[in-house]
């Protein structure tokens, strides 16, 4: 039941996505069949339904236009994208793809929703966008609005009303998108005049033998990488949704392999690429689907439709599919977050808006790359600020009464810098400044406590070297405590340890503190 219901929901979306991609409705149907079946068969998420999705179609439409619709080049990009996804799974990259921050995901998904709506708005009024891409589509909207094809506009508005307000009670038996497709097509037959899809090929898909052109090689590779990464992110996000609903845990790497197999085979048979589809997966689970069988049945149902009923799709108006896609675009936009974003961190909202803008007006690769870099830099800055704030206080984290008593006796002369974890390169840049400020206040000895530091990077090592050199020039003492084997090895391996006397290295902070106090009292270090 889950597979049958998901297949019914997928039918109008597959046709609409195929038409929007430029490859034609039947290519959308083949993509849903092949990706849906093989991604379920080889994937790692039991209840996931795969097929053409909004994000993938936005990218694929750009690829189709950029390669002048040449199927041998266009579907070569799809095949390479599938192979890259398989490699990502084999090399176990699934765990890293899920690390994309939420504001970045929200921004580029919302941007894709905006693009889908922009591309379909002119079609709602009975006109085709002038040129390919988001900007030409936006430019064509005023002309389409000022000179509408009234029957197309009426069908589009009827479709929007159905997909947005279709009763949930009826949705259990017939999904809103399918109802809009059927009702809109019947009204179009009764009242002709709206642009239609026209003839659609039927029967089995033909095999496509891809070819490569040196002139188009870079564009094909760029498209393949983008499709692979976007499909991987889209699929794994949907897998997380499925996990939450079924209380199971998916296998990220196996899911990437399944998606890759599906997209590779789809490319050989002229099917548009796909990924895990959140709405269809949710419908599948709510209808009882729990295992891979549901996704395979969903593909089999669509195959039966493609073989027998494809000619009937010729009567579907463009405006009806446009209305269905506008609803898809709206569902992709992260409305839930946008409504409450003003109550959350301002930087996250700014990052989301930046990624959204880059997605709509530049491209997805730039948007995601810039978003991830900015998010990483913001995280490093936040971590560095917290570490520097902790270091500036010069109050070590200790409940040891003996250590506290010793520190009180030499307050103002001995400082312990207690690192609470790995010293980030963001904090390392200002670490030397923090130390120099303490020496200006009359500090004589400085204890660097590495007890809680499991690892150290080059930036931190260079910071320690700077501090050691400053100590030599200022005739101050640097004492190291708690440096683990790896930290000790790295410090000595880069010759930093040689600048600090060997009798200034201690495994225990209490012993380091006792040594510092003994030095202040001009007593032999052994005491």
Image: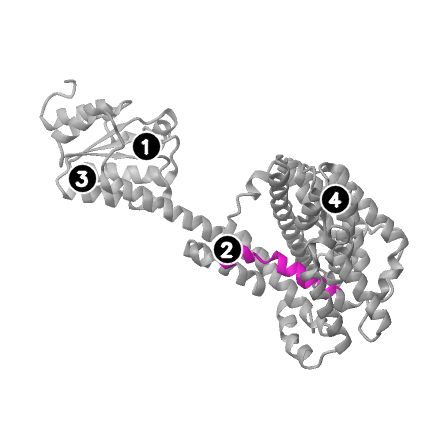
Residue 155 is situated, as x and y percent measured from the top left of the image, at 76, 70
Find residue 292 and report its image quarter.
top right
Q: CA separation, marks 2 and 4?
A: 30 Å
Q: Residue at x 76, y 73 (%)?
A: 152
The quadrant in which the N terminus is found is top right
Of residue 406 and residue 268, the one placed in the foreground of this image is 406
The first of marks 4 and 3 along the sequence is 4
Circle 3 Cα neighbour tier, 10 Å, few/some/many (<14 / 14–19 / ≥20): few
According to the image, what is the colour scheme of the structure? one colour
Circle 4 Cα neighbour tier, 10 Å, few/some/many (<14 / 14–19 / ≥20): many
Q: Residue at x 56, y 43 (%)?
A: 98
For mark 3, what is the residue?
Answer: 473
Lateral position of residue 496 relative to residue 255, left or right: left
- Residue 280 falls within the magenta-colored stretch: no
The first of marks 3 and 1 along the sequence is 3
Task: Name the secondary structure under disc 2.
Answer: helix
Residue 73 is situated, as x and y percent measured from the top left of the image, at 75, 56
Residue segment shown in magenta: 321-339
For mark 4, what is the residue?
Answer: 262
Foreground: disc 2 or disc 3: 2
Q: CA separation, marks 3 and 1?
A: 18 Å
Tag count: 4
């Amino acid at each position: 039941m889950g597979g049958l219901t998901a297949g019914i929901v997928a039918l109008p979306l597959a046709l609409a996505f195929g038409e929007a991609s430029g490859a034609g409705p039947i290519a959308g149907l083949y993509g849903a069949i092949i990706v849906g079946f093989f991604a379920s068969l080889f994937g790692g998420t039991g209840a996931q339904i795969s097929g053409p999705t909004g994000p993938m179609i936005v990218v694929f439409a750009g690829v189709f236009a950029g390669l002048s619709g040449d199927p041998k080049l266009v579907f070569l990009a799809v095949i390479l994208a599938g192979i890259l996804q398989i490699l990502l799974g084999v090399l176990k990259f699934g765990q890293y793809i899920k690390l994309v921050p939420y504001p970045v995901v929200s921004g580029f998904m919302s941007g894709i929703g905006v693009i889908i709506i922009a591309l379909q708005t002119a079609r709602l009024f009975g006109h085709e966008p002038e040129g390919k891409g988001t900007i030409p589509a936006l430019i064509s909207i005023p002309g389409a609005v000022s000179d509408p094809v009234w029957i197309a506009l009426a069908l589009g508005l009827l479709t929007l009303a159905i997909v947005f307000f279709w009763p949930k009670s009826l949705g259990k038996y017939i999904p809103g998108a399918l109802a809009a497709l059927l009702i809109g097509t019947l009204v179009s037959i009764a009242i002709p005049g709206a642009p239609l899809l026209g003839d659609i090929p039927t029967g089995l898909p033909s095999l496509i033998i891809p070819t490569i052109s040196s002139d188009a090689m870079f564009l094909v590779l760029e498209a393949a990488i983008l499709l692979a990464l976007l499909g991987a992110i889209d699929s794994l996000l949907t897998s997380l949704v499925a996990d939450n609903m079924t209380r199971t845990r998916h296998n990220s790497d196996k899911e990437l392999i399944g998606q890759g197999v599906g997209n590779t085979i789809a490319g050989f048979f002229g099917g548009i690429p796909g990924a895990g589809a959140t709405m269809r997966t949710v419908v599948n689970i709510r209808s009882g689907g729990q295992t891979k069988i549901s996704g395979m049945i969903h593909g089999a149902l669509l195959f039966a439709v493609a073989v027998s009923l494809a000619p009937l799709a010729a009567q579907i108006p463009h405006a009806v599919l446009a209305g269905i896609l506008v609803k898809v675009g709206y569902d992709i936009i992260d409305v839930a977050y946008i409504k409450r974003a003003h109550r959350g961190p301002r930087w996250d909202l700014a990052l989301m808006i930046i990624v959204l803008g880059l997605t709509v007006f530049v491209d997805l690769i730039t948007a995601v790359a810039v978003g991830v870099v900015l998010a990483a830099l913001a995280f490093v800055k936040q971590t560095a600020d917290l570490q520097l704030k902790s270091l500036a206080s010069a109050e070590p984290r200790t409940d040891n009464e003996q250590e506290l008593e010793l520190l009180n006796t030499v307050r103002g002369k001995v400082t312990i810098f207690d690192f609470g974890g790995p010293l980030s390169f963001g904090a390392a840049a200002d670490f030397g400044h923090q130390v120099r400020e303490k020496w200006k206040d009359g500090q004589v000895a400085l204890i660097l406590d590495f007890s809680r530091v499991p690892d150290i990077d080059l930036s931190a090592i260079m910071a320690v070297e700077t501090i050691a050199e400053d100590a030599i020039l200022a005739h101050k003492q640097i004492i190291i405590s708690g440096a683990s084997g790896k930290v000790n090895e790295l410090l000595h391996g880069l010759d930093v340890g040689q600048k600090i006397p060997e009798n200034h290295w201690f495994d225990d902070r209490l012993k380091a503190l006792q040594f510092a106090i003994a030095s202040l009292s001009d007593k032999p270090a052994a005491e």
